[in-house]
Image: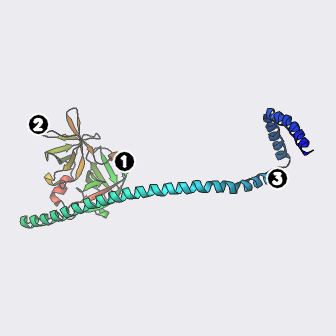
Amino acid sequence: MKGRNSGSVVRIAAPVWALVQRFYFLLLIFVAIALMMVGRMDPVLVDQARARVTDAVAPILDAFSRPAATVANVIEYGRQLVELHAENQRLREENARLQQWQQVALRLEAENGSLRSLLAYKPDPASSFITARVIADPGGAFVRTLVVTAGRRDGVKRGQAAMAGQGLVGRVVQVGEWSSRILLITDLNARIPVVLETSRQRAMLSGDNSDRPRLMYLPRGVEVTAGERIFTSGHGGLFPPGLPVGMAQVDQGQVRVVPMVDLARLEHVQLVDFGIPGGLAAEAAQPGAMK
């Protein structure tokens, strides 16, 4: 009897299963519509069912995620070990190089001290500076000038150099009680004795109211390398030697200088007193001062 009943059940289930397989897509659509209708009629019931399904599936998802997270952590740890090993090796090499340079610096310092004692070297006077904010670009007789918020009451004097960042900006040409005017190195009245870094050839930096002043009075045959740095030479007592001014740029046979500082975006400057003798500083501060 049992065999006959089981056989009859199989015979009945087979057509039903075939019918389900044929119309399962329509059944899914019907189930989805039914669920939407139930959700509209009783949203609380649907939310509770969703929450229960999520609670039931969460442990399974957590169990599956643990091995993946463990593998990811192991891979990340291994990567960090490789990076730490490479970083440690790089630091060891850098430390060795720095130790070599330290020994060279100590040896040069001792040699420099010995030579200074032989030459009765007189050190440069200590410099002081005042930081001021740029508040205006008035133009006028001096086209390329700036006005800053520091004056006589702050210790500003005519002839002081104006620096910004790592480069020379200009020179103080007018001092008030609360403000000062700076003549930029690009102004038509600016003339600065300079020297080329590589060839040590002297020249004159001449402003022409453009963003890149010209390099004048270079002897014939002197080759200027593009990108070569230009420094103040110290001649004439206008500036101390060694102040960075800009980099050379060769343009159609003319040598121009790209300033170290973007003069169009100045917000703050340092007015530096390098201890230049009063007579030279005063002469340098007159109109056309940087000639």
Counting residues from the start of the chain, the first of labels 2 and 1 encountered is 2
Q: CA distance from mark 2 to mark 1?
A: 36 Å
- Residue under label 1, please give it: 265
Q: Secondary structure at mark 3?
A: helix
In percent of the image, x 21 and y 47: which residue is there?
A: 230
Where residue 244 appears, x then y in whole percent? 23, 51
- Residue under label 2, please give it: 221
Q: Quadrant of the N terminus?
A: top right
**Residue 288 visible, this orientation:** no
For residue 37, above or below residue 26: below
Q: Secondary structure at mark 2?
A: loop
Where residue 113 appears, x then y in whole percent? 13, 66
Q: Is residue 54 left or right of residue 205?
A: right
Q: CA distance from mark 1 to mark 3?
A: 64 Å
Where residue 260 appears, x then y in whole percent? 28, 48
**Amino acid type shown at disc 3:** Val
**Amino acid type shown at disc 1:** Arg
Judged from this view, the residue extending furthest toward the right is 1
Counting residues from the start of the chain, the first of labels 2 and 3 encountered is 3
**Amino acid type shown at disc 2:** Gly
Which residue is nearer to you in this view: 187 or 64? 64
Badge 3: residue crowd in 10 Å (few <14, some 14–19, many ≥20):
few
- Residue under label 3, please give it: 44
